[in-house]
């Protein structure tokens, strides 16, 4: 039971990663590799601040600001200097590796025994056992984030963001500054991804310089799994439901990894397991379309 509850808790943490990846991949159709660096950035900023005695909630907020700045840097490189989107993300992620090392001062910061965002909930929800507080807290924060994103994408600016991803020429003709919209959207995506890194580091009890390597694959797999589940539902799902599906996809992905480990596979095969599940997530919908 502990294995499954732990997978759900971690899946909720990575649900924010899935939301961030959804914005760039599905709203903008922008392959943003910055996620690998911004997730670690969120963890490193949080860990460094908490270890220095800063309030955990302030640390989370500042980590999101750092993630937003990383994303806007990618957006500026892409829009203002006309650099390929994929290369823009790679450049920023490469630079963030050194920046994260400077922030932490070393490759790993332990957070065992320090107060974090879960500490108040652990006291208030002690009757629910060890796994109750993280699941309740991460679920509430994910629900709040989903609500705020839904409201944003229903606003005029949010509709402009969605239209920019669908047809840049059309929305530009309407007088919308597509560069500004893109920069903000990529920054918002990475702010949410940095939030994911912040929560993961506090939940796991450490921040490590390598924790974000290849994480974009996990985020993309979560989005695809969520879309595969929603494909069974008749009609076109709303944007809010699609974002919620990405969160559910992250939880399911972590559960699948937990099942693989429970069956006896070695933890050193985690990347191989991840690649296999991503392949299944990408290939199965295509095979289903061919059969239909």
Image (cartoon, helix red, strand yellow):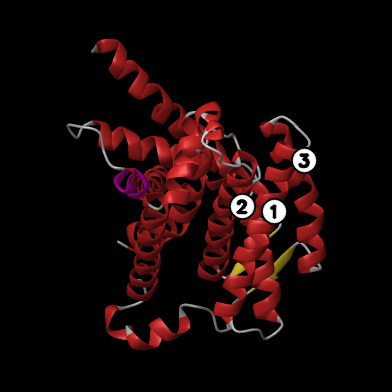
Q: CA distance from mark 2 to mark 3?
A: 15 Å
Please give the name of the residue rendered at 67% of the width and 86% of the height, measured from the top-left corner: 53
- Residue 242: which quarter of the image? top left
> Which comes sooner in the sequence, label 1 or label 3?
1
Front position among marks 2 and 3: 2
| Residue under numbered circle 1 | 70
Of 23 and 207, nearer the camera is: 23
Q: Which residues are magenta?
A: 240-245
Does residue 233 show up?
yes
Please give the name of the residue rendered at 52% of the width and 59% of the height, measured from the top-left corner: 196
Q: CA distance from mark 1 to mark 3?
A: 11 Å
- Left or right, 106 with respect to 239, comes to right
> Which comes sooner in the sequence, label 2 or label 1?
1
Identify whether 55 is placed above or below 235.
below
- The location of residue 198, given as percent across then percent down, is 57, 65
Of 291 and 5, nearer the camera is: 291
Of 25 and 229, nearer the camera is: 25
- Left or right, 131 with respect to 187, comes to left
Chief secondary structure of the magenta span? Answer: helix
- Left or right, 77 with respect to 147, comes to right
Q: Quadrant of the N terminus?
A: bottom left
Of 189 and 218, nearer the camera is: 189
Identify whether 72 is placed above or below 57.
above
| Residue under numbered circle 2 | 187
């Amino acid at each position: 039971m502990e294995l499954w509850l732990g997978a759900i808790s971690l899946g909720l943490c990575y649900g924010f990663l899935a939301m961030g990846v959804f914005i760039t991949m599905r709203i903008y159709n922008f392959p943003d590799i910055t996620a690998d660096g911004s997730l670690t950035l969120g963890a490193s900023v949080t860990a460094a601040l908490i270890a220095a005695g800063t309030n955990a909630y302030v640390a989370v907020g500042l980590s999101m600001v750092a993630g937003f700045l990383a994303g806007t840097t990618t957006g500026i490189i892409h829009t203002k200097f006309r650099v390929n989107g994929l290369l823009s993300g790679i450049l920023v992620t490469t630079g963030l590796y050194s920046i994260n090392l400077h922030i932490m001062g070393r490759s790993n910061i332990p957070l065992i025994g320090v107060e974090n965002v879960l500490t108040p909930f652990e006291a208030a929800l002690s009757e629910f056992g060890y796994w109750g507080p993280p699941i309740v807290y991460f679920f509430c924060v994910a629900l709040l984030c989903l609500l705020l994103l839904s409201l944003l994408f229903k606003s005029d600016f949010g509709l402009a963001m969605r239209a920019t991803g669908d047809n840049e020429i059309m929305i530009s003709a309407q007088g919308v500054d597509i560069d500004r919209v893109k920069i903000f959207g990529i920054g918002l995506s990475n702010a949410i991804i940095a939030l994911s890194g912040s929560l993961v580091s506090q939940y796991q009890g450490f921040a490590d310089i390598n924790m974000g390597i290849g994480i974009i694959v996990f985020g993309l797999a979560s989005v695809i799994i969520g879309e595969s589940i929603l494909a069974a539902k008749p009609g076109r799902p709303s944007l809010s439901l699609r974002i919620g599906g990405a969160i559910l996809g992250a939880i399911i992905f972590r559960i699948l990894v937990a099942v693989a480990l429970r069956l006896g596979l070695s933890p050193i095969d985690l990347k191989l397991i991840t690649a296999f599940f991503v392949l299944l997530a990408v290939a199965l919908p295509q095979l289903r379309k061919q059969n239909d």
